[in-house]
Amino acid sequence: MDPTTTNDFQQTFMQGQQALQYEAKIHQDLDKQVQALSLPKQKYLTQISENTSVLEELNRINENNKVFKQVGPSLVQQDLSVAKDTVKQRLEFMQGKVQELDETIKTKLEQLQASKEKFMNIQTMLRKTKEEYQNRAQMAQAQQQAQQQAQIQQAQAQQQKSKQDS
């Protein structure tokens, strides 16, 4: 097999390996980003659960009951409707944040899937390139062996002719 083909193969294979490493890094980075986004989402979900419980409790009591909120180390009386509105606003805010995080996570997961597909395509290309190189090398070796065999046969034929002529 000629050296230029070998050099071309090596260059193509090395470029493919570099692309594979690059795509693997992108995949790892995206995976870390998804994990990092999951922590604040979980925090918001916990807070939503807690605030939902608070709102349910506030809905159970009547207007005559006193409601207090903690401000620093002290408790301050608060109007029931104001307390309900405050909790509802907090819930809306946190639900909005969860929705934003879900959209961002969805986008990152789509990018992660695209990265995975690209990674697999590069692996396939590398495997096919290697197989093609091996097939060419085997064909070149077979051709070389056939040429050597032909030369041997030609030399034997010349020897026999020389013997017959003498």
Image (spheres, rainbow, N blue to C red):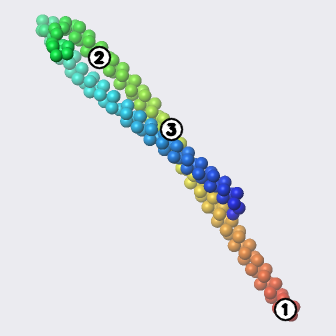
Q: Amino acid at mark 1?
A: Gln
Disc 2 crowd, CA 10 A, few/some/many (<14, 14-19, 20+)? some
- Say if 119 sits above or below 138 in the image: above
> Gap between marks 1 and 2, in whole Å?
109 Å
Q: Earlier in the sequence, mark 1 or mark 2?
A: 2
Q: Earlier in the sequence, mark 3 or mark 2?
A: 2
Give the residue pinned by disc 3: 114
Q: Position of residue 6 (x, y in %)?
A: 66, 58
Q: Amino acid at mark 2?
A: Arg
Is residue 69 visible in this depiction of the protein? yes
Give the residue pinned by disc 2: 90
Q: Which image quarter holds the N terminus?
A: bottom right
**On the picture, is 25 further left or further right than 3?**
left
Residue for point 52% across, 43% down: 22
Give the residue pinned by disc 1: 164
Label pair 1/2, CB-CB below 8 angstroms: no
Q: Amino acid at mark 3?
A: Ala
Q: Position of residue 127 (x, y in %)?
A: 56, 54
Q: Nearer the viewer, mark 1 or mark 2?
A: 2
- Say if 149 sits above or below 165 in the image: above
Dot 1 lies on which element?
Answer: helix
Dot 2 lies on which element?
Answer: helix
Q: Position of residue 20 (x, y in %)?
A: 53, 47
- Say if 160 sits above or below 52 in the image: below
> Gap between marks 3 and 2, in whole Å?
36 Å
Is residue 62 visible in this depiction of the protein? no
